[in-house]
Image: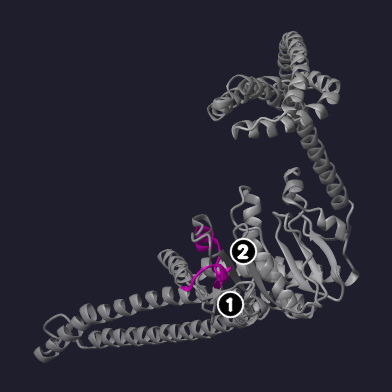
Amino acid sequence: MDSTIIIYIIVDIIIAVFIWLYCSGQTSNSKTLASQLSVENERLKTKLAETEKKLTNSVDLENELDKIESKYKALLKEANEQCAQLDEQLKNAIDGKIDNSFKEQLAQTEKLKKKIEDLEEEIEENEDDISDLKKKLHLKDEDIAELQDNLKTEQKNTNSLKEELSSLSQTLDDKLEELKIKMGSLDFIQEILSAKEISTEDTQKLYKRINAFESFVKGSYLDLNSYLYNSDDIPWKEFIGKQAIVPKKQYVIDHCDQWTATKRKSWLDGKRTIAFVGEFSAGKTSIVNRILTQDNPDIPKLPVSTKATTAIPTYIAGGSVVSYSFISGDGRRKEILEETFKKISKEVLNQIKGVSSLIKYFVMTYKNPNLNGLSILDTPGFNSNDSEDRDRTIDVINECDALFWVFDVNAGTVNRSSISIIKEKLNKPLYIVINKVDTKSESEIQKVEELIQKTLKEEGLKIEQFIRFSSKASIEDIMTPIHSVKKIESRENFISEIKEDLEHLLKERKEKVDEQYKSYTEECQNGENIIDDLNENFNLLYKDCEAASQIPRWETHIFSSDRYEMSEEEYDQLIQVLSTIAEERPKIIADKINNLIENAQKAQETYSKLCNIENAWQNINDCLEQYKKITKEL
């Protein structure tokens, strides 16, 4: 801005010179000349503005002008004073007034003119210097442009190296994370393999008795039923007095497995057991936590990380203390630390091949009054690619009393593979939980519910109840259906059902023994009656033969030979007796003999059945005695 001020001062001096010339030569036309000077003044200002624009294009030029400014500061004050006087004189000239002082000012103006000429020369010299500086600046600009190109190239190379370094760094982080997971998996396996078995003398005795009963049911008991089926062609029936939907043998095997599993699991025995399944992010864990806390902030929630996705079913049951354990592949219960349990994640388990041979499922006992009489099974769902994982999940769900299937209302779809598994593998009361209903309108929720209901109905699945739930819903909305779930009594009463069946079979065979014995006795009596009838007919035949032999009489004659003789009446009588002997008596005797043979065969068959039934009755009785002996300690 200082260089601009100097330029304007020079312009004002030039204007003053023109005014002096104007005043000295043409005083009468001062107004016209003043107007021309104003136009010229504007032209010069425009030219100088362009010069200023050129000068301000370079920082170096400003520095040069600063030097000029410092050199002519002394002239600035004088020029300002002169300009002020010239302005006054210009005004007087325009008004047609010229005083004596103008001559003195004229002399001073001559001096200023000389100085202006000197300044113009110096400006020309400075312009040459400025031109040289511009050339140098242009060369520097070229150097700078080259340097900038080099800088861009280097920056590009640097960015490429940075990207490569970032990729290598990410790869290193991934490898470190993978190594961390592998190390975690190794630590987890070591802790699992070194876990101590939870076993007491009482537990061992209980397991021994349970195993003995299981062997009895699947061995002697089912063999007895097979023997009864094969021995007297009695068809398999549904379990006596029960509404079973499968053949008796399959019913017995399934319920024996469930009873055995329940008896071995203290966290299930005598408790109502609920299985929760659901797709990823359906909100299953949040529901379980609300069941545990009952919205009481003083009760801790289930310590399950939202990032931990276990592929292993986990039981959560009440207990006096918090404990963590797992059931090994050979059915043993082993205790682990809480830190070990918290290491479980999908990433860790993916590193372990054949995890099902090590761990069937986890058991967590939790000191929580809301779990009294209740056991919750948290499952990974049915969408596992591992058939062993899926089968293991199905097995543990079959030990539960009801299945609660959790849907996210925002999903709006039903997993077809899950439907297929529930339909084919599970026969449990089914409750549908539509979760997060606070995120949708009533009409949208109704559409989702109708879609689920329609889909499951088409598949032949019965729904016990639809439950709408969310974080804002009352806890009773989920607890009321849970309390309505009925325990599977057939599992609880399985031992007594086996006894009832044996006693029924024993009673049934005893009745058959009595019935067959009665039939055999009757058939023996019938045989004796037939033999009596035969004896009677043989006696009659003998009498008829004797009567026939007595009809001809032996007569002696004088004039003829002696001979048997009879009258015509006696002859007719003989013919009649002989006819009876030859036709009637043999037929009657033959019929009686045939009746006797048939009776003997029937009696033999009845006796054989009687022996079989007696053997069956004895086998049933032996089996019942064996049952009593095994279950006495249970």
Q: Which residue is mark 1?
A: 614
Q: Residue at x 64, y 67 (%)?
A: 276
Residue 9, position in %: x, y? 73, 26
Which mark is nearer the camera, 2 or 1? 2
Numbered badge on residue 277: 2
Q: Does residue 364 belong to the magenta stretch?
A: no
Q: Looking at the figure, which quarter contains the C terminus?
A: bottom right
Q: CA distance from mark 2 to mark 1?
A: 52 Å
Crowding at mark 2 (Cα within 10 Å: few <14, some 14-19, many 20+): many
Judge by depth and name the residue closer to the eye, 9 or 418.
Answer: 9
Taking the image as shown, residue 296 lies to the left or right of residue 238, namely right
Q: Name the residue type under label 1.
A: Glu
Q: Are marks 2 and 1 in contact (CB under 8 Å)?
A: no
Quick check: 451 above or below 513?
Answer: above
Describe residue 267's horizontal placement relative to residue 234 as left or right: right
The quadrant of the picture occupied by the N terminus is top right
Residue 364 as seen in the image, left or right of residue 445: right
**Front residue of 23 and 586:** 23
Image mark for residue 67: none
How far from the left and from the top, in percent, is residue 315?
A: 73, 66
How many numbered discs sit on the rendered protein? 2
- Percent position of residue 443, x then y: 44, 71
Q: Secondary structure at mark 2?
A: strand
Tell me which residue sits at (60%, 32%) in the image.
96
Q: Residues within 10 Å of mark 1 (few under 14, many from 20)?
A: some
Q: Quadrant of residue 602?
A: bottom left
Q: Which residues are magenta?
A: 419-442
Q: Position of residue 222 (x, y in %)?
A: 61, 67
* N-term mark: 2 or 1: 2
